[in-house]
Image: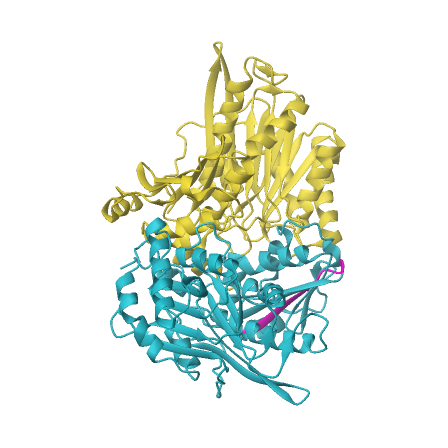
Chain colours: A cyan, B yellow
Amino acid sequence: MAINLTIPKMVFAIEGIEIGVTEAGIKKENRKDLTVFKLDEGTTVSGVFTKNLFCAAPVQIAKKHLLLGKPIRSLVINTGNANAGTGQNGLKNAQTICSSLGNLLKIEDCQVLPFSTGVVLEPLPVDKILNNLYKAVLKSDKNNWMEAAYGIMTTDTIPKIFSEQFTIDQKVFTITGISKGAGMIHPNMATMLGFIGTDIGIKQSLLDKIIKDLADKSFNRITIDGDTSTNDSFIIMATGKSKIKLESEHDSNYHIILDALAKAASDLAQKIVRDAEGATKFITLQVEKAASKEEALAIAYSVAKSPLVKTAFYASDPNIGRILVAIGYSNTNIPINKVKIWLNDLLIVENGELSKFYTEESGKKVMKQSEIVIKISLNNGYFAEKVYTCDLSHDYVTINSDYRS
Amino acid sequence: MAINLTIPKMVFAIEGIEIGVTEAGIKKENRKDLTVFKLDEGTTVSGVFTKNLFCAAPVQIAKKHLLLGKPIRSLVINTGNANAGTGQNGLKNAQTICSSLGNLLKIEDCQVLPFSTGVVLEPLPVDKILNNLYKAVLKSDKNNWMEAAYGIMTTDTIPKIFSEQFTIDQKVFTITGISKGAGMIHPNMATMLGFIGTDIGIKQSLLDKIIKDLADKSFNRITIDGDTSTNDSFIIMATGKSKIKLESEHDSNYHIILDALAKAASDLAQKIVRDAEGATKFITLQVEKAASKEEALAIAYSVAKSPLVKTAFYASDPNIGRILVAIGYSNTNIPINKVKIWLNDLLIVENGELSKFYTEESGKKVMKQSEIVIKISLNNGYFAEKVYTCDLSHDYVTINSDYRS
């Protein structure tokens, strides 16, 4: 049961992007497991990927193709198999898919980006993909974002989609995006994927810079169980079909557009946490007044990853000691007697000690909620960071100790 | 049910160390919760403590007293209350206990080291301790190590004790030690405590150096859930009553003695993992041929702390993908195509890929065992490290999401 995860009533198409979803029987029959994006000429594309050393074949190919610099005109995503830990054959297979799709679309193979998610250490059933690519191409339509949200799901329980229109100077622009994945769900590390499309035109070099900042406010700020998979990928496609163009950080529209994109990315990343199976609480770690970004992140992640903190949240137990301990081993040098902590609006720690006004009753009340913000003020500087996570439940163990079939 | 945790048939006294254990009713009545060590003149004492920024009052006092440099002649350990997160009052209370015991033993308060373990963020019932110290002193006897092992338990299910005699040049020396604690057991972060006594004479400066090396082979190499408490402490007491003296690293007996002490420390540290409640598997991470100690440790801890790896072990599932992924996000730059991994004697990964000879059947067989060594050879240098951990089970969540009473 996802935590307060909404599906937008209206999903807007993005001019210049068409999507087709089909069944290729990659792992299971009668399942939409193959998705193709077609991008009009003039679209700029940027991506950020997992830093895991064992990064999967599709990730290696996607990075290579982005570096080669030719305009990216297509994305292909399969579920059912991550094509990870598959060595040279895996790379060959990912390349073959790009060539085959390139032929169908009359573009070069280096203009295609491949993505895979699913079982690792098993060879990709590449023939099934090759035989069905044309179907996805034939079915492509600009109104298929919801289909795509379903098409990229593996063990997600609910499609994750964002879609909104914004106005600048009476000109409208649109952002629509989808995401999938939550590390907890499947024994084989459900990959995190995010795809955002917009009809704004964004210069390539600027987009390359923007996407890193966006990732650092969204997909790089979620943690479910601390594990990052071999296939994590986040892509932005800017088609330029609207009347709005972004050339540099000095454009008057820069901040409005960045905020809109950040809203999309953050929403899609948070939805991954909200759908983490077994999760009953959506937890925000908000660290403020840190001496540096690194200090803020170290504290936020220390608390967000602590099994003792996460099981306390599962129990709705305002166990303040565990939060303090997690801050204490964060590998920072913060002055602990300046620390202030709130659970939502409730002040629980002041000057590094239990707040004089704190009562167990008030703590219990806050902890019963499904959305909780742990705000930690370090009073040590001017930097702030946010990290999103969920609680640790019996279901997490159940799901992840189920023997792989 | 602890995993292969033995209690020695014979527990040897250490000449120069007497121990008394009594009931002070600190948290519960009729429970041995107050332990006093008396050390003869000539004993050298060294300690290493938690690096947690919120380190408890007793830890702050113990560190201060060790730094002051007067000979340490007594230790006092209470369970039931950690005296952590207790601010200035907590420090005052810990100091008062040292003064009171100092008076009883006719030593200065800075010659006493205090230790506490139990509930945090609650004031220490210091009167109960002060009123019962004399009982512990009266009952002190050199044959009370087993009593002490019980006396320091909080939610441990079994006393942890090591005792062995060694011979050098037909001269006998003795090492006896006790430990307690396993992060998983109690919602309030059961502290890790270790106390080792020996009748060897060890020069103070040498002991100060030795204890750090020993901690780095033992207590600093275990992880149950990654959380380190506010009270973790490890103490060595060398009475000098045997005929064997250690003056410097160049003594011919240095390595024999160091190995013996390492055996004791390692045994006591591993026992903490073996008694981690809910644990069903004792797991050793053995990383070899790393480019540096830091690289070896980063890899070992990454795997040892991964919830996905630990739940797989709980399921007896040879999920190799999860081990590779954990290595992959270890924040190192190892050449992954050189990685070799064994589960006990079974080679599972070679050249960064699944071993050609690996079968699921053989993997399942190994994973059914309760003692498993994950050996990871990086082929990247000459450094090696070992880390000990256990699996992640339903019981972990149950125990740690029980509302505090």
Lateral position of residue B254 relative to residue A339, left or right: left
The quadrant in which the N terminus of chain A is found is bottom left
For image coordinates 35% across by 56% down, the residue present is: A120
Q: Is residue A279 above or below residue A338?
A: below
Q: How many marks?
A: 0
Q: Nearer the viewer, residue B195 or B20?
A: B195
The quadrant in which the C terminus of chain A is found is bottom left
Residue A380 lies in the magenta-colored region: yes
x and y, in percent, of residue B306 in the image: 46, 52
Q: Nearer the viewer, residue A184 or B15?
A: A184
x and y, in percent, of residue A356 in the image: 72, 66
Q: Is residue B379 something one can see in this rendering? A: yes
Q: Is residue B404 something one can see in this rendering? A: no
Magenta-tinted stretch: A370-381
x and y, in percent, of residue A68 in the image: 50, 58
x and y, in percent, of residue A323 in the image: 60, 59
Q: Nearer the viewer, residue A303 or A268?
A: A268
